Image: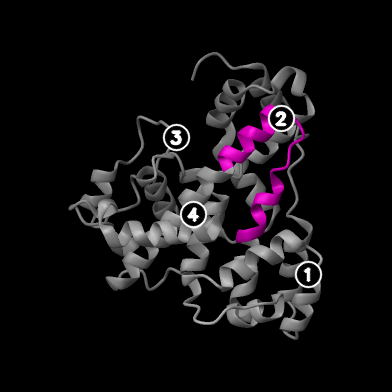
Amino acid sequence: MAAPNALYLLIDDRLKRDELQLPGLPETAERVREATLNPNCNLQELARIIQHDPALSARLIRLANSAYLGSRSKAESLMQALTRIGLRRIRTLALAMAVEQVFCPANDIVREYAQRYVRQTREIAAASVVITQHLQERGIGHRLHQDVALLAGMVSRIGLAPILKLADEFDDSFANPSLINGTMRGFGGKLGVDVLKHWEFTPNLIRVPHYFRCGRMKLLDDAIVVNYCDIVHLASLLTENAEADKAAMTIAEYEQREIIPASGFWQEESIQAAYQTMLETLS
């Protein structure tokens, strides 16, 4: 990269001093996760927790009414939505829907940057779901789950959160997209891993920010060993949201490993329809 900018140097210094403050999970998402760890947890308890977060409640109702869950009748209430989602899936989907709440800067420039990031992340997450569905239809993705692919896409660039926090805190100096971009290129992967460790995510998701820019070039031999790191990186390429990196895997290399067909997969009408439907659900 070019000579380190001031925001980059500040992040670097705080990391070396172990003084960089990482964001916590959104409060409601943390409470949902804690509740679902209790074997006696039930939908009524989760509804009481989630109803205090109107934004998360609305997104879960919308998700429950979407084609993603194969909905035929409309859920009118949060309880109906949670019943449709099911106890086993609520934790993952609540986390996925709540991640965006981490990005709430006050400065106009930083907020606009965060909003653009959220839009791009939704595109990556929606594409991750479509790729996972495609793999499962081919009988390859039996170890994968669409909900987890959705969450993986949503947290793929979570390393931006502490960077935006500092840019917002010192907005007179750092409310500048070029400074943020340069710092994200330098620290985005490491910080993303650090945040997901801090949130106590599982290893299959913690690795996603690390491989977001390049893919698993040396580890991905063929479609049989594909994981969420591969799916998210491929999704970033297909949606043209990949960060420039000369060492990164290309769409052609994913085609060679038979992750996707080498015949205009992303341009297929059915694939685009599924992607647009999923993107609308997340918007």
Marks 4/3 in contact by CB < 8 Å: the verdict is: no
Q: Secondary structure at mark 4?
A: helix
Residue carrying label 4? 125
Instruction: Give the labeled residue for mark 3.
Output: 243
Who's the residue at 57% across and 21% down the image?
Answer: 178
Give the Cα distance between marks 2 and 4: 25 Å
Q: Amino acid at mark 3?
A: Glu
- Per the image, label 1 sits on a secondary structure element best described as loop
Magenta span contains residue 101: yes
- Discs 1/4, front: 1
Number of other residues with Cα within 10 Å of mark 3, as a class: few under 14, some 14 to 19, many 20 or more = some
CA gap, disc 4 and disc 3: 15 Å
Indicate which disc, 2 or 4, sits on the residue closer to the N terminus.
2
Whether residue 92 appears in this view of the structure is no
Part of the protein shown in magenta: 96-117
Q: Which colour style is shown?
A: one colour
In the displayed structure image, the side of residue 215 where residue 164 appears, left or right: right
